[in-house]
Every structure is written in structure tokens, then in C-alpha cells.
Image (cartoon, grey):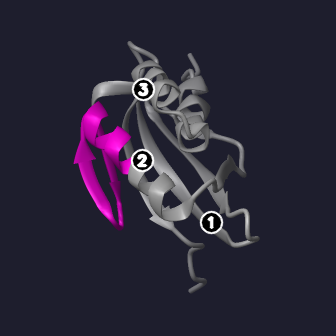
Amino acid sequence: MAADTRCIDTMLSAWNSHDDSLLEQIVGKSLSPDVEFCDPFHDIRGHAPFIEMVKAFWAKHGKCKITRTSAIDTHHDRARYTWLIESPTGGRFEGFDAVTLDLESGTVARVDGFFGPLSPV
């Protein structure tokens, strides 16, 4: 049985919503209550810290757009994909996430985010 990955695109839409009430709905729908989110700048757990992180991103970076730029590759309860952040001024920043899915609830349980492309050997 293939993992249901719709929660990933729903989660990514949180960054683009720019609306407090919509953000809370998106988070409640796409993330497990005890979601873990870890990237080079964050190591948080739970809905409230995730919402605070997204709002801080909005405050610092304005209305950037985050887009998934690859297919979602899955096995078992794991997924990976690449993304791109584009600012209204033309700046671009890419990275990728490795995600653990909660297959029972259809939500994201953990996100490990990495910034930038990998360097060749």
C-alpha cells in the first residue's frame, strides 16, 4: 500500500497562506499533534511552535512562495522531496525535506529539512 502524501503539500501550503486562521487549519489537518520539525535553524515539537516558526518566517521574509519542485519519493512511512523558496524580489533558495508520515492519521509526524543542494564528491 502506497503512503498517502497529500499531507505534505498541505503542510507546505502553510508557508504560503499568510493568514493566521488558515495557518491553524492547515497545521491541524496536515501535522500530527506532536510533530517534530528540525532544520539548520529549528528543532521544535508540536503545533504551536510550528505555527510560531511559520509566522516568524513571514515576519522576516514577507510573502515568499514555497513550491515543491520534485515528485515525492516514498517507502514505508518515509518520504523525500525538494522545494524552492522564491521571494517577491526575485531571490531563490532551494532545499529538501526527509519526512516521516503517520500512516494511521495521514499526517506528517517529522520533518528533517536541509538547505541548499548537496555538493558533489
> Dots 1 and 3: beta carbons under 8 Å?
no
Label 3 sits on a secondary structure element that is: helix
Q: Is residue 3 left or right of residue 38?
A: right
Occupied quadrant, residue 113? bottom left
Is 40 included in the stretch rendered in magenta? yes
Taking the spot 42% from the left edge, 26% from the top edge, the residue there is: 24
Q: From the image, which quarter does the N terminus lie in?
A: top right
Horizontal placement of 25 versus 89: left or right? left
| Circle 2 or circle 1, nearest the eye | 2
Q: Residues within 10 Å of mark 1 (few under 14, many from 20)?
A: some
Tell which of 13 and 105 is nearer to you: 13
Residues at marks 3 and 2 touching, judged by CB atoms closer than 8 Å: no
Between the C-alphas of marks 2 and 1, the distance is: 20 Å
Residue 40 relative to residue 5: left or right = left
Work out whether mark 1 precedes mark 3 in sequence or the reverse, and give the earlier one.
Answer: 3
Residue 55 has which mark?
2
Circle 2 crowding by C-alpha within 10 Å: few under 14, some 14–19, many from 20: some
**Alpha carbon distance from label 3 to label 2:** 11 Å
Residue at image location 57% in from the left, 29% down from the top = 10
Q: Position of residue 96 (x, y in %)?
A: 55, 58
The relative height of residue 57 versus residue 29 in the rendered view (above or below) is below
Residue neighbourhood size for the residue with mark 3, other residues' Cα within 10 Å, grouped as few (<14), some (14–19), many (≥20) = some
Real-space Cα distance between discs 1 and 3? 25 Å
- Which residue in the structure is indicated by mark 1? 94
Q: Which residues are magenta?
A: 35-54
Q: Is residue 3 rendered magenta in the image?
A: no
**Res 118 label:** none
Classify the position of the C terminus by image quarter: bottom right
| x and y percentages locating residue 103 in the rendered image | 42, 19
Q: Residue furthest bottom?
A: 121
